[in-house]
Image (spheres, rainbow, N blue to C red):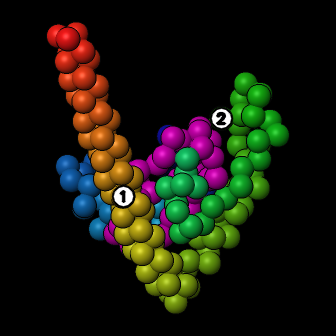
């Protein structure tokens, strides 16, 4: 579906590869990650993964994508005026302004100096996001341990009271 479109419009700077068995190969050959989601993504892990390879990300500002971007990359506002229409997700007419912003941002990244700067920002953002996620995990684990210890203490007090 996409290949005929690219050929018909003579779009030569888009390469569609076959599937790779390891994601590292895909990211090693990726210059920019586009995330044109219209669906309310809960998080968008692919964003953090790409950024960890220094890949600048352009993504729609829907769902949890903003949190995954963590201040890095380029967020594109989506026109949700027609969101309740049956063909919202399939009719390109509703999204022409979004496509225009993607094109302008891609053109901006054609400047090597801008690209290198955004690549460094992506690396730093991914590291910060991973750290934040690790901190949340550590905090949650500590909370679970405290809750489990409190539960054991309460159970122990309960069994002691029953014996008396």
Query: What residue lies at 77% left-to-right and 28% top-to-bottom?
Result: 85
The one of 128 and 25 positioned closer to us in this rendering: 128
Query: What residue lies at 53% left-to-right and 41% top-to-bottom?
Result: 41
Q: In this view, does 143 lie to the left or right of 117?
A: left
Residue 50 position by quadrant: bottom left
Would you say residue 56 sits in the magenta stretch? yes
**Residue 137 visible somewhere in the drawing:** no
Asked if 159 appears above or below 9 in the picture, the reply is above
**Quadrant location, the C terminus:** top left
The count of marks equals 2
Density class for disc 2 (Cα within 10 Å; few <14, some 14-19, many ≥20) is few
Density class for disc 1 (Cα within 10 Å; few <14, some 14-19, many ≥20) is few
Q: Distance between the residues labelled 1 and 2?
A: 39 Å
Residue 109 position by quadrant: bottom right
Q: Which of marks 1 and 2 is nearer the N terminus?
A: 2
Mark 1 touches mark 2? (CB < 8 Å) = no
Provide the secondary structure element on which disc 2 rests.
Answer: loop
Range of residues picked out in magenta: 34-63
Would you say residue 80 sits in the magenta stretch? no
**x, y percent for residue 1:** 50, 40
Query: What residue lies at 72% left-to-right and 61% top-to-bottom?
Result: 100
Residue that carries the numbered disc 1 in the rendered image: 135
**x, y percent for residue 82:** 80, 36
The one of 95 and 64 positioned closer to us in this rendering: 64
Residue that carries the numbered disc 2 in the rendered image: 90
**Residue 138 visible somewhere in the drawing:** yes
Q: Residue furthest front?
A: 164
Provide the secondary structure element on which disc 1 rests.
Answer: helix
Residue 140 position by quadrant: top left
Query: What residue lies at 52% left-to-right and 63% top-to-bottom?
Result: 70
């Amino acid at each position: 579906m996409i290949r005929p479109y690219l050929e018909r419009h003579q779009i030569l700077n888009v390469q569609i590869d076959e599937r790779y068995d390891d994601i590292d190969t895909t990211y090693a050959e990726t210059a920019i990650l586009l995330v044109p989601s219209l669906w309310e993504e809960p998080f968008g892990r692919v964003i953090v993964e790409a950024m960890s390879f220094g890949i600048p990300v352009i993504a729609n500002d829907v769902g949890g994508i903003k949190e995954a971007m963590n201040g890095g990359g380029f967020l594109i506002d989506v026109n949700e005026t027609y969101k309740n229409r049956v063909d919202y997700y399939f009719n390109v007419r509703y999204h022409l302004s979004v496509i225009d912003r993607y094109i302008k941002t891609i053109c901006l990244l054609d400047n090597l100096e801008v690209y290198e700067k955004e690549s460094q920002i992506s690396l730093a953002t991914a590291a910060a996001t991973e750290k934040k996620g690790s901190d949340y995990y550590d905090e949650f684990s500590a909370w679970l341990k405290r809750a489990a210890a409190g539960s054991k203490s309460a159970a122990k007090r309960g069994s002691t009271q029953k014996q008396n």
